[in-house]
Image: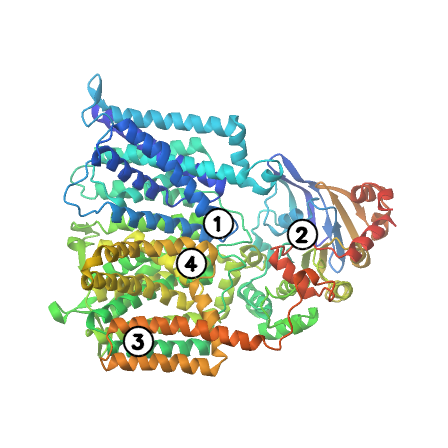
Amino acid sequence: MQTFLQYTILGLAIGGSYFIAASGLVVTYTTSGIFNFAQGAIAMLAVFTYWQFRWGWNWPAPLALLMVLGVLAPLLGAALYQVVMKNLRGTSEVTKIIVPIGVMLGFQALATWVWNPTSSTPRQFQKFFGPNAFVHFGSIKVSWHEIIAFVIAIAIAVGIRLLFVRTRSGVAMRAVVDDPELLQLNGGRPERLALISWAGGSFLAALAGILIQPMIGSAMSAGQLTLLVIDAFAAAMFGRLRSLPRTLAGALVIGLTTTYVIAYFPSKWTWSSSFRNSLPMIFLFIVLIVLPQDRLRGATVLRLRERFRMPSIRTAWIAGLVLMVVVFCLKVIMERTAVNTLTLALTFAIIALSLVLLTGFAGEINLAALSFGAIAVIVVYHFGTTGSGTAARTTLWGILLAAVVTALVGAVIALPALRLRGLYLALATMAFGVFVSRMVLTERNERDIFGLKFTIFTAGQLTIPKPKIGPFDFNSPDAFLFLCAGLFAIIGIGMVYLRHSGYGRRLAAMKDSPAASATLGMSVVRLKLSIFMMSAAIAGIGGVMMAAQIGTVNSDRFDILLSLSLMMITVVGGIGYISGALFAGIFLIAFVQMLDLTLKKFAVDYSSIEAIFLFFVSVVTVLPATIGITMGKNPSGAVSDIVAGLDQIKQSKPLVITLVGLEAAIWALAATDIITNWHFVILTMVNLFIVPVVGGKILLARAMRGVPKPVPPELIGIDRPFTFDDLAEMDRALDLEGVVVLSAETVREGATGVSA
Amino acid sequence: MSLLETVDVKVKFGGNVALNDVSISVEAGSVTGLIGPNGAGKTTLFNTITGLQPLTSGKIVFNGKDVTKEPPHKRTRMGLARTFQRLELFTSLSVRDNVRVAGEIRNRWSFRTTRMDVNAETDRVINLVGLADVADREVGEIPTGQARVVELARALMIQPTLLLLDEPASGQTEEETEQFGELLKDLARNDGLGICLVEHDMSLVMKVCETIHVLDFGTMISSGTADYVRNDPTVIDAYLGSPESVG
């Protein structure tokens, strides 16, 4: 009984903290329509800042609290809204998901930069009034901290409820999401309300973080804290991101069950701690599955404006060949380590292809691509290798088996996808990813599964040898490089074929308008199931290649945060394009690493200004996230812009010749060791970026000569009559597609028709 | 027996009654008009018929079968097609592929014996509705008026017995509307389709519809032939406030 009470109180306190974080999510989502994936990251930043004030600089607790909760957190929330989130109104759902994720990853990198995780002195974070402040109720003792956590949670629940129901601004807040324009017409100010709610939401996240950190009793870790508050997502989903009482109930259920697992599971169950950690994710998944079904809607994850042009099959083959040639040329001049980096980048590009297939082609979302990779790697490790020591090889059958298993797991993940769309689906896949990280990849003990003695993730790391397929041994780095490049090209070309088939068109139909597809008689079950399975299999194969390239992988290689980064950068590169996947792999692995190495090399070479270079090394860690955050501006991705620029250039032979010629010359210099790899990279970039820009300007200037100036819009109808193209153009510019446009004649006729 | 009947269909959004016991019928081989001021509930009624909007009460009978509980795609497979007022085109596909994919979807669910040659049928329908000139353009690039015709072509590809058209003529030129009216009459008379037309262009409605139902604030206020409805004082009142205000 005593244990029960003790753990119940702890459970209520932890559940209360979850509720505080979740209520912040509900408040920001209700007023801005944006789900704040960065909620956990804000909490994490607050914890570290509070630690800095309280124990780093020995400020008194009230002052540190006032500073963090009263000043910094609300400011951060308000700034986030003002600078980033405000611009997301009216963008696609995928952008609304990716941008907050970018913020989250950015904060994560920032915290690691400021508070070095490998610092020698461990950071202690204590409960309020110290670790020994207890109250005794009969035989049980309860720390003041836990009481405070629970009482604050209840106070906040009541407070927000009163705010929403009783006060004018609360009612207005609820109106914002229903119809911001209508609210504005009625004199409300949705922007200001959203700003306030983001400040409030950030405050709540910070409060939850500071309350929860000492209760979990482990060392402060940026990654762990960020994900910890993800557990609050489950609570928020209990209330469907609307109802606070249900959110509170959900949070308490999660808090209590997780503590009871620790209290009552037999200690010989070595998996109970992993189970406790993944319980919120299991809740989240279940809640999402049993949520009432969304109504079919027109607008989807990718909106009208984000149109992707699919290359012809011929173009795809040419592009594949070019890729192989380029990879060969690079291999010739590059050092061993650089070749390895390039190979790794290509394996990530293969994983990113699974995202292009799923999101770009079918409009579905998966935030846990690498978790599928992890499953495939486990399969290959256990069933897919032959030989031992240096003679060990991954077999073709092993890879195929891994693809089949991941496809089947993909089918399970597709279950919620059959009912959910957009944000809800994103959360379901993320729950799956975190579940894999916490439950599967922590399985280091031998288990007896159906009579099969088995350790899933042996000793925390798995060794995957290079593959040997038939007579072809891909053990040498060069051979493996070509295997990965070839695999990417083949899957990419296959996807273009797919997109041009009836199946691909049906996918596009499902993506563009679920409502119209349904009224054409389409049943999405098999389509969704098959696309999820295909995408999962590709991610699995990519994962195996990635592990084979690295050699020995630990669970960090499949971290959910890495999956999120990959998704984000693929969206930046252009989620509808094969090239977008290539961009993602190259950027995330090769480019970031190259910048990192270059800067570190400079720091050594020019040691007098070392600090500056080291500063930029840290900047590079934040770079991917920063690029993700800017996505709101260019929804079709960066690559499409570059390609669109190149399209112009393709028209001009001289320019193409200049470009290719210069590049060949630079390559020749590097191949003959006249210039180093560093110079090669820098010169190549100059060539690829400067020549098109300058050349494009010249071309444009030449093309403009002799072309009549277009009629300025305000003079259409005066200088020349309106055409239907003009009207359509106006419709598009004003985003009025589908709005009734009655010409003057029809209105008049209609009126006389009725009254006659 | 009518091809389609809605029986006392009621839809509530919270406290708002969007449709209040609306009963209409559509006959095979004829064009039925459904008119009413903006917000009268016309599109909501279409959504209930196609299954995109659940009913609060009432039932939908199609081909003599109660389909109230059937999901949208099952109703389509029984021969029900529609177009959307807010365009729901497949924007990543060209005009031709928009039409073609509808045929491909149909071939997936139709019986083996009734499968169509999708390419031939696509060409036929594109020529029938007059989209040949823009067939290879991106669907987002063509004017709204033509985009609505793409919606019609797409709906025709599933070879429906009942066609629901939601403001198909808005954004069309007068000439296009003229041709469009003829096309609708043809489809009804020659192919035996039942067509239900929501339209604000009264001259078109009066010209092609044998029967007209009038909705106002979710309630059916009048129903009958074009001549009857045109002279019904309730209709004139609902539409124009009062006849004098037109001048």
Callouts 2 and 1 close, C-beta under 8 Å? no
Badge nearest the viewer, 3 or 2: 3
Which chain does the numbered disc 1 sit on?
A
Rendering quarter of residue A605: bottom left
Residues under labels 1 and 3: Cα distance?
38 Å
Q: Are marks 3 and 2 on the same chain?
A: no
Residue ID at (58%, 65%):
B102
Q: Residue at x 71, y 40 (%)?
A: B217
- Colour setting: rainbow
Disc with the residue nearer the chain's start (4 vs 1): 1
- Mark 2, secondary structure of its residue: loop
Residue A529's mark?
A: 4
The kind of residue on which mark 2 rests is Gly
- Which residue type does callout 1 highlight? Leu
Helix, strand or loop at mark 4 = helix
Q: Where does the N terminus of chain A fall, quadrant-wise?
A: top left
Nearer the camera: disc 2 or disc 4 = 4
At label 3, which amino acid type do we have? Val
**Which residue, given by chain and number where applicable, does mark 1 sit on?**
A88
